[in-house]
Amino acid sequence: MAKNNLNSLALGYAGAILSAACMLIMGVLGRLGIHTNAVEAMQQWHIFFSLNVVGIIAGIIEAAVFSFVFMYLFGLLYNKLT
């Protein structure tokens, strides 16, 4: 049987792009005053995220970096265990 491995780098990039897009959407919604409870939760969970332009960009970068690292490590661990 052929061994199928995850492409850990692609998984990391996909996670980073998805989390950055979600953070951008949350920032825009927060600036519009929509879903304020979710935006407040994001401000508690992320160190650099706030509702000004610099805070949204910093939150996007933070989310992308953390997601890339975690997804990349998940892919490596998955490939080791299969």
Image (cartoon, rainbow, N blue to C red):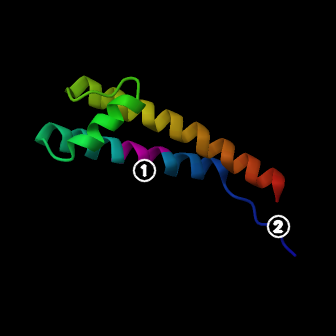
Residue that label 2 marks? 3
Which element carries disc 1, helix, strand or loop? helix
Residue 48 picture location, percent across and down: 36, 23
Residue 45 picture location, percent across and down: 41, 32
Mark-to-mark CA distance, 2 and 1: 27 Å
Residue 56 picture location, percent across and down: 28, 31
User: What span is colored magenta in the figure?
Assistant: 16-21
Residue that label 1 marks? 18
Q: Is residue 59 left or right of residue 6?
A: left
Which element carries disc 2, helix, strand or loop? loop
- Label 1 crowding class (10 Å Cα cut-off): few <14, some 14-19, many 20+? some
| Residue at (28% x, 35% y) in the render | 40
Say whether residue 53 is magenta: no
| Residue at (52% x, 35% y) in the render | 66
Q: Quadrant of the N terminus?
A: bottom right
Say whether residue 18 is magenta: yes
Residue 26 picture location, percent across and down: 27, 43
Main SS of the magenta segment? helix
Q: Which one is closest to the eye, mark 2 or mark 1?
A: 1
